[in-house]
Image (cartoon, grey):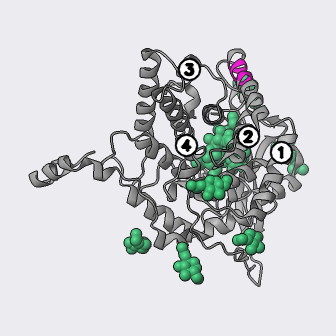
Amino acid sequence: MRHSHQLPLVGVLLFSLIPSQLCTICEVSKENYSRLNPLINTMINSKYAKGVQAANVLLSLRLVGIRNQSIEQQLIQQVHDSEESTDLTSGQLALVILALGACQSSDETFAYPHLVSQLEKKFQAEIKNMEIHHGNPLTNYYQLSLDILALCLFNGKYSINRVTKLFTPENKNFYFGGQFSVDTGAMAVLALTCVKRRIVNGQIKTDEEHFKHIKGHIKSLVKKILSEKKENGLIGNLFSTGEAMQALFVSSNECLNENEWNCQQTLDTVLEEISRGAFHIPIAAAQILPALVGKTYLDVNKNSSCGSGNFNISSQEPIPVVPTSSPSYILVHYSVEINETYSTDVTVPTGSVFLDVMEAAQKMNKTAFCFTVRESSWGSYITSVQGLKANSNDRSYWELLSEGKPLSQGVGSYVVHNGENLEVRWSKY
Ligand code: B12
Ligand SMILES: *[C@@H]1O[C@H](CO)[C@@H](O)[C@H](O)[C@H]1NC(C)=O
Ligand SMILES: *[C@@H]1O[C@H](CO)[C@@H](O)[C@H](O)[C@H]1NC(C)=O
Ligand SMILES: *[C@@H]1O[C@H](CO)[C@@H](O)[C@H](O)[C@H]1NC(C)=O
Ligand SMILES: *[C@@H]1O[C@H](CO)[C@@H](O)[C@H](O)[C@H]1NC(C)=O
Ligand SMILES: *[C@@H]1O[C@H](CO)[C@@H](O)[C@H](O)[C@H]1NC(C)=O
Ligand SMILES: *[C@@H]1O[C@H](CO)[C@@H](O)[C@H](O)[C@H]1NC(C)=O
């Protein structure tokens, strides 16, 4: 798909003479920082954010250099609250560590060594589960990547040998329903790059063989990430693009040229989506922001590379959505698909989300449409329908679809349309 043959000879010559100039991280310029305000407002106003969401927000704000005492205190309290509940998953604990340890001055030692040793244990438990359950971790590879990233950045123990084996790009855990997960691949690239840099700096020792494998894994994951680049510049989808950008920033030893990645185009599309309010969920805002100002999760323990915070923080509340004066109604078709299909038509007010449809259907017929949800960092996650529960050990989950196509938002955010065919399907990922 390359069209370099159209480059005139002069271009080719110039191009090969100045490769290092194409290597700069592309980022939103300071003059345009105000275009990031919707993200910052969403994050700062997420006052009631709990646990993982708070950790993501704190990490992101610190990375870009927004250090407001009162906001930090509030978030740190929430992060501590979630740390006290002992049932944190490995990746949740890893995020807590990243957030609490982010951007501290180098003379401060990390104040939470006990959390790091807890994380070592939780990582072991993930491996153990993989051994018992056909290579399926307790959680997923996005979280195993977060684990390695936090252990690497905060001097935890992990075996290079194990990391090399786990993160072979062909591993099934990089795929959901046969589709490469850009979010997961990007997080793995960040983790592996951290490990690679430690080897290069002589902070950890390993043999040439393992080092070669790690470099190979990074290279091939980056290739997979780039192959998920879309016409409009997004990588994967809107919500994986920020972390994909981070992965591309840290991994490009040899710089990427414009045929491989037009970073400016990616930026433009993301900025456009910001202005449309696409990142209204705090965690979505938190995950996209660092990359837009050229930061990555690898900057976490380098106080000096955390941002300068040249933002104008306004405590302005997000614009409230004014309900339309006369509520009108729409009709949607809803079905639950297991082996059989259970369908119904549901009438809901205009502007309703998927969850409203499910609740209305449940009221009509509990047997066919009862379900349970769990609140998570991204909102309401469907855990069971008709009593049938999702389970990581056999990779089962409830998939959301519209017109037969998987949705890229959850039931709490996806706004439904008149005449739409909605479906929750018992699936394997
Ligand atoms: C792993 C994963 C899954 C796994 C979760 C099970 C497992 N074994 O872990 C599977 C494959 C089942 C899955 C399903 C879905 N996912 Co998913 N998932 C992820 C991923 C890659 C990592 C999540 C994670 O572990 N985070 C780290 C830990 C520390 O945070 P956590 O809050 O404890 O994580 C939990 C929640 O994130 C929850 N979860 C996972 N996906 C989703 C999606 C939604 C909408 C909600 C509310 C919760 C949720 O499961 C995690 C583990 O318990 C993220 C990528 C990302 N950037 O976050 C996408 C991501 C969160 N998922 C996404 C989507 C869209 C979905 C689906 C709606 C897809 C669909 N069409 O059915 C479904 C959820 C349907 C439902 N039942 O409600 C989007 C959300 C975007 C948005 N704006 O809402 C993301 C950002 C991917 C993307 N780039 O599009 N997912
Ligand atoms: C700021 O954004 C505008 C509109 O997208 C763009 O034309 C301009 O070049 C940007 N400014 C800088 C300095 O990058
Ligand atoms: C390092 O962090 C401290 C706060 O912990 C801050 O005051 C200082 O300005 C930071 N240094 C740099 C170079 O960012
Ligand atoms: C912040 O606001 C001040 C005053 O309104 C303005 O002069 C300055 O340029 C703004 N800075 C940024 C980065 O937007
Ligand atoms: C910090 O944030 C709070 C709440 O948003 C705000 O009231 C306060 O003025 C901010 N302080 C500084 C120093 O920016
Ligand atoms: C679906 O049908 C298959 C084949 O009849 C059966 O093995 C499986 O248990 C059924 N699944 C569910 C969730 O009922
Ligand atoms: C509810 O759904 C079940 C399963 O499809 C069906 O057997 C039952 O008749 C329905 N009950 C009502 C009241 O419609």
Residue where numbered disc 1 is placed: 82
For the residue marked with disc 1, what is the amino acid? Ser
Q: Give x and y (percent) for residue 228.
A: 44, 44
Tag 4: Cα neighbours inside 10 Å, few (<14), some, or many (≥20)?
A: many
How many angstroms separate mark 3 from mark 1 (CA)?
30 Å
Residue where numbered disc 2 is placed: 92
How many angstroms separate mark 1 from mark 4 (CA)?
24 Å
* Closer-to-camera residue (200/124): 200
Q: Residue furthest bottom?
A: 325
The tag earlier along the polypeptide, 3 or 1, is 1
Tag 1: Cα neighbours inside 10 Å, few (<14), some, or many (≥20)?
A: many
Extent of the magenta region: 124-130
For residue 292, above or below residue 251: below
Q: Is mark 2 within 8 Å of ligand 1?
A: yes
Mark 2: which secondary structure?
helix
Q: Is mark 1 within 8 Å of ligand 1?
A: no
Would you say the magenta stretch is mainly helix, strand or loop? Answer: helix
Please tell me whether residue 396 belongs to the stretch shown in magenta: no
Give the mark toward the camera: 3 or 2.
Answer: 3
Who's the residue at 56% across and 39% down the image? 187
* Residue 63 visible here: no
Mark 1: which secondary structure?
helix
Give the mark toward the camera: 2 or 4.
Answer: 4
User: Is residue 147 rendered to the left or right of residue 297?
Assistant: right
Q: Give x and y (percent) for residue 130.
A: 68, 20
How many angstroms separate mark 4 from mark 3 (CA)?
18 Å
